Image (spheres, helix red, strand yellow):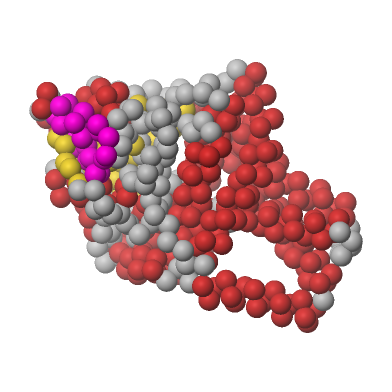
Amino acid sequence: MKDGGPAGLVADAGEAWGAGARSGAPWTFALLVAGALVGTALLGLPLLVNALGVALQVTFFAFFARHLAFSVAALDSAPADLAAPLIETGSQPSVTVLVACKNEEAVAAVLITSLLGLDYPQERLQLVVVDDGSSDGTAALLDAAAAADPRLACLHRPPGAGGGKSGALNAALPLATGEIIVVFDADHRPRTDVVRRLVRHFADPAVAAAQGRCEISNPHLSPLARLVAIDYLAGYLVNEYGRQALFGLPAYGGANCAVRASTLRELGGWNPRSVTEDTDLTLRVHLAGWRVRYDVTAVDAEEAVGTVSRYWRQRHRWARGHQQAWRDYRRAVWQSRHLSRSQKVETTMFLLTFHLPVLAGLGLVVLALWLAGLVVPPDPLRLFLLWTLLFLGPLLELGAGLLVSRTDRREAFALAWFLPLFFISISLCCAAWVEGVAGLRSPWAKTARAGDAVPRGTGS
């Protein structure tokens, strides 16, 4: 490990962790409003809006270039990597698999079958499931499975223990005996060789985490689920692939992933203050000088949300967590001595992913002012053409994901739902941003499963 390992480097990330309590302070919102009022007074509304329009154009073009670069990288190399055989390093470190479960009665039985079917030496594999204060039949199902098979251990947390998924995983961490911690979500169905494919990357002592690829198991549940499935193709076959190929900065995704136990403990475990513990840990790992690897061949399947209300609930949590990570770590990123300048730019753009729809919402406000005749942009046609880049960039990745995966071309018709979903994403990201800067608390919100009669309460 460069610079003698991460033991003395945790401060780069750890100092920012404590900022979670301060992020989103109400004064931030007040400062932004005051700046807008002063700018309007000094420049006048038309000039201020035109300057804002130029800034948005530059931002949208930069993100379009990023989407394009990722798409080209994926189309060029991902198909060959997908077909690569499993080449093991010969090292078989001990592994602990952790799964946090709250009100997972609908998926618990299939989860246990998947875990017990993992192809890894049994004497080097520990399986731990955490019942996080479930109020349904989850605890009984997990206890029965643990009693029937000694390979499986079940830990119980009391109701209201707090911390969401992070709290549940942290509670199990003292029990973990493995050198590598592998995490799945309760609705995930890993292929039998996933653990072998993930742990081989830790033969490199500089690697602290590895992320696999997730697919959607129920794409035909609804038109929305089909679009989410395509979104996952773009996210894992294009975006995540491109971040690794071009910058060496893939993200630890929180499920179907592995992390070195010693590194995790040195970094203080998962952050219970964050509702997206994966993004938070990604930043802390990179800032501490470690590497994350992405394995496109380590595949598991998970459920897609099938209704707009469940989509809103899930993506709103993602937006809150990502936006919080920006507030917590943006300074640490640019002060880091472990990231190159290009990596700092890419990490900044990664952190701003869920801010971009907020900017799109701001762009809609500018458009409304134009249509109302309050302002007239100097070149409306150029403004319109450049703003379309905000929409075309993600569309490029969606198309590239379909091509790389060799999906039936008829699936492309699902992209007709992309535009209305785009406006839903703008709305939920704007709502998350306003809540964040207003300092409103964001509790962990469990994603409801397809088998649930109604969305459950909060939890892991």
Is residue 139 located in the magenta-colored stretch of the structure? yes
Q: Position of residue 149 (x, y in %)?
A: 12, 24
Does residue 191 lie above or below 324 as drawn?
above
Foreground residue among 329 and 451: 451
Is residue 67 located in the magenta-colored stretch of the structure? no
Q: How many marks?
A: 0
Residue lying at 27% horizontally and 35% vertically, measured from the top left: 136
From the image, which quarter does the N terminus lie in? bottom left
Tell me which corner region of the image, top left, top right, bottom left or bottom right, holds residue 199: top left
From the image, which quarter does the C terminus lie in? top left
Does residue 154 lie above or below 334 as drawn?
above
Residue 23 is at least partly visible in this image: yes
Tell me which corner region of the image, top left, top right, bottom left or bottom right, holds residue 395: top right
Left or right: residue 110 compared with residue 427: left
Residue lying at 81% horizontally and 66% vertically, measured from the top left: 50
Q: Position of residue 209 (x, y in %)?
A: 33, 46
Residue 90 is at least partly visible in this image: no
Q: Position of residue 97 (x, y in %)?
A: 23, 37
Foreground residue among 295 and 187: 187
Residue lying at 76% horizontally and 50% vertically, measured from the top left: 387
Left or right: residue 25 compared with residue 367: left
Residue lying at 39% horizontally and 30% vertically, measured from the top left: 452
Q: Which residues are magenta?
A: 125-146
Q: Position of residue 397 (x, y in %)?
A: 61, 37
Foreground residue among 421 and 2: 421
Tell me which corner region of the image, top left, top right, bottom left or bottom right, holds residue 120: top left
